[in-house]
Amino acid sequence: MNNDDVESLLERMPLVKVPASLDAKVLGRARRGRRILFWTAAAAGLAAAAVVLAVLNFGGPTKLPPLPPPSKEAMAAAEPVRLEQNWSQLSYEGVVVPDGRTPLRQFRRQTLEHVQWIDASNGTRTEMTIPREEVILIKAPVD
Amino acid sequence: MRHAIERIYGERRQGLFTLALAITRCPARAEDAVQDAFARLWKSQARPDGDLVPYVFAAVRNAALDQVRRQEPTATAEPASVFNGLVSDPASEAITAEEHGMVRRAVDALPEPEREAVVMRVYGGLTFDEMARALGEPLQTVASRYRRALEKLSERIKAVAGPSHE
């Protein structure tokens, strides 16, 4: 019996299987961490938006003198401008039980990403719109 | 990195659990060790270079060794094997009951470092290079240890089985 034979015997041995509870413990923790990250990012985004709104509102309207039109040379030398706008909404869709056992709260997030490139040198404008939809499931507490 | 570690768990969970079981010799402690290791990995801010597989195996091994250190010295439970009881299935090419008993006893009798090497290589699917990185030892040392373990297993199986397994 050589080493290959021993390896072959070892490969055919039935192992103690991974307990089903381990998957829930390991992956549940990973997903919980990801949800915390998502909500932290969402909260940070909302806070940033609130700050921008506050600055715009409390800064008050300021009248600026009209700018002179740019020269033809400046227009020709200008780099294309990239403008990006994002819209997002989160809606709660109630409790679902996909596997018949675990109640989950279902949220739907719809996002629209709109990007424009404006080239002042030749007056062209390129636009791209990317719609996205995500369904987020969060384990509902069971009393 | 989270996604990569989650993928490694999905692909190698059996090997990781078997390694923890080979060290702790207790299924409940092995489960705790894998759970602890991944809890540390999720929290960790470290960004190791290169292949993450040895890094994850090293984390599970360390957590299993921690479990052994925390074990009550008075615990008298019989050490568990990494092998399950043989389920007879005549239709499959399953191992015979005789072979099962011989291999199980031979593997359980190996010194822990050699048993670890066998589990990492055969059930974890690690290369010698990955094993060396997981254990923090030179590649040659790890490869020799594995070969020595196979030779011991071969000798023990031959001694018990006689000429039919020569």
Image (cartoon, grey):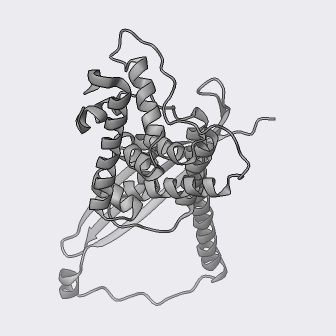
Q: In the figure, residue B15 lies in which quadrant?
A: top left
| Residue at x 67% of width, y 80% of height | A58
Q: Which is nearer the eye, A31 or B162?
A: B162
Quadrant of the rendering where the N terminus of chain B is positioned: bottom left
Is the residue A9 above or below the residue A61 in the image? above
Is the residue B115 above or below the residue B63 in the image? above
Q: In the figure, residue A76 lies in which quadrant?
A: bottom left
Q: Which is nearer the eye, B20 or A64?
A: B20
Q: Which is nearer the eye, A110 or A35?
A: A35
Is A63 on the left-hand or right-hand side of A80?
Answer: right
Across and down, in percent, residue B17 comes to 50, 42
Determine if residue A31 is in view. no
| Residue at x 30% of width, y 36% of height | A7
| Residue at x 65% of width, y 76% of height | A54
Extreme residue in the right direction? A143
Quadrant of the rendering where the C terminus of chain B is positioned: top left
